[in-house]
């Protein structure tokens, strides 16, 4: 199969970076501190903005305030955050104007994790701070396509979560699910 594409949009966590140990530690600690089932919370956390996870698992809480706490916990927990095999080489070989990272992390968290993993912050990046509706809504990927100046149909997305795959498909993009 030969694909004709003009740009590549990468999810960050689970595609370019392995941050799963950190994510799971942070959400486990947060869930325990609030009397919630850690397995349920962790299951909701992957591939979504933190604030949406909090709203889903604890609608009675002040999501904005809790989100600030969770984000700082995630920024502070760098143990085990590493680049996945060949991520650095792939990103260095792509022209900067032909790819973007589209992540559910906030910009400070994304920049921190990229640094912990030894990856450069790319020219084009869409974060949780840039969207109103995160994955599984198409907004993050539509913004990624606009950022690189390419029609959604001409983008190829690399994703690792059901929410991210749904977002890319809803945006009219082809997806490689990892």
Image: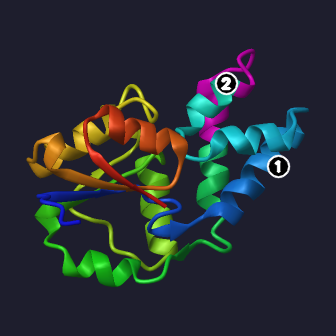
* Residue bearing mark 2: 56
Q: Residue at x 91, y 32 (%)?
A: 35
Does residue 3 appear in the picture of this structure? yes
Residue 113 drawn above or below residue 105: below
Residue 92 lies left or right of residue 20; in this view the side is left
Magenta residue span: 57-69
Task: Please tell me the numbered disc located at residue 159.
Answer: none
Q: Earlier in the sequence, mark 2 or mark 1?
A: 1
List x then y, in percent, for residue 143.
24, 39
Residue 96 drawn above or below residue 49: below
Residues 7 and 3: in front is 3
The coloring applied to the image is: rainbow
* Residue bearing mark 1: 29
The answer to if 68 sits in the magenta stretch is yes
The answer to if 119 sits in the magenta stretch is no
Q: Are marks 2 and 1 in contact (CB under 8 Å)?
A: no
Considering every residue shown, the one lying at the far top of the view is 60
């Amino acid at each position: 199969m030969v694909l004709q594409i003009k740009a590549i949009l990468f999810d960050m966590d689970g595609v370019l970076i392995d941050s799963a140990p950190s994510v799971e530690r942070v959400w486990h600690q947060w869930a325990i501190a609030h009397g919630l089932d850690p397995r349920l919370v962790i299951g909701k956390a992957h591939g979504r903005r933190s604030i949406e996870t909090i709203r889903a698992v604890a609608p009675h809480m002040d999501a904005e305030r809790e989100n600030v706490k969770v984000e700082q916990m995630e920024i502070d927990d760098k143990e085990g955050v590493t680049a996945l095999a060949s991520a650095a080489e792939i990103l260095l070989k792509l022209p900067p104007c032909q790819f973007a990272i589209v992540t559910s992390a906030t910009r400070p968290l994304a920049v921190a994790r990229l640094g912990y993993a030894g990856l450069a912050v790319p020219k084009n990046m869409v974060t949780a701070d840039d969207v109103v509706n995160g994955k599984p809504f198409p907004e993050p990927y539509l913004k990624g396509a606009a950022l690189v100046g390419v029609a959604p149909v001409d983008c190829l997305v690399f994703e690792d979560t059901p929410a991210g795959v749904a977002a890319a498909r809803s945006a009219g993009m082809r997806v490689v699910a990892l």
